[in-house]
Amino acid sequence: MTQPLPKILPVNELKNTASIMKTCKESSVPIVITKNGYGEAVMMSIKLYEEMFAKMQEAALVNAGLEEAERGAVSMDGQEFFDSMRAKYGK
């Protein structure tokens, strides 16, 4: 699956804030702000930021689980896990 390319916006176009905010809100990709042709900053909507942050957190949890498994952690299925939690904490 390929990711769409980010939008690129020169820093001198940041003067029209209302238009830029609209572009951020409507965009499904980050907007790279450039200065002299080089990337300097990234803008994105809060929604896109939250989605990207959630994906990073999920990836970190998966990686932590894989590392645990590589270190020999004991695995259990979902039912075993919930049974052990009930036994430990009640209900």
Image (tube, grey):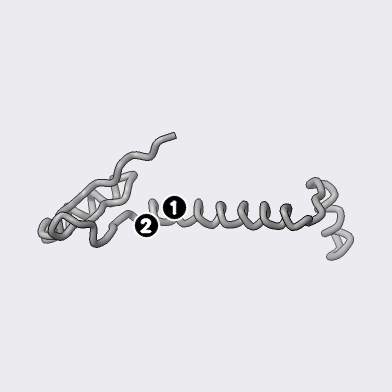
In the image as oriented, which residue stretches furthest toward the top? 1
Identify the residue at image location x=39%, y=53%. Answer: 47
* Residue 65 pos. (x, y %): 68, 54
Identify the residue at image location x=15%, y=54%. Answer: 37
Q: Which mark is residue 23?
A: none
In the image as oriented, which residue stretches furthest toward the right? 87
Left or right: 11, with 83 as reference point: left
Identify the residue at image location x=89%, y=60%. Answer: 87
* Residue 34 pos. (x, y %): 19, 57
Q: In which quadrant is the N terminus drawn?
A: top left
Does the residue at mark 1 contact the one at mark 2 (Cβ under 8 Å)?
Answer: no
Q: Dot 1: few (<14), some (14–19), or many (≥20) neighbours within 10 Å?
A: few
Q: Dot 2: few (<14), some (14–19), or many (≥20) neighbours within 10 Å?
A: few
Left or right: 5, with 56 as reference point: left
The residue singled out by tag 2 in the image is 46
Q: Is residue 21 above or below residue 79?
A: below
Amino acid carrying label 1: it is: Met
Q: If you read the primary sequence from the N terminus, does the residue marked by circle 1 or circle 2 appear first?
A: 2
Q: Which mark is residue 52?
A: 1
Residue placed most toward the observer, 66 or 25: 66
Amino acid carrying label 2: it is: Ile
Res. 61 image quadrant: bottom right
In the image as oriented, which residue stretches furthest toward the bottom? 89
* Residue 40 pos. (x, y %): 23, 61
Element at label 2: helix
Using the numbered discs, state the Cα–Cα distance from disc 1 to disc 2 in whole angstroms.
10 Å
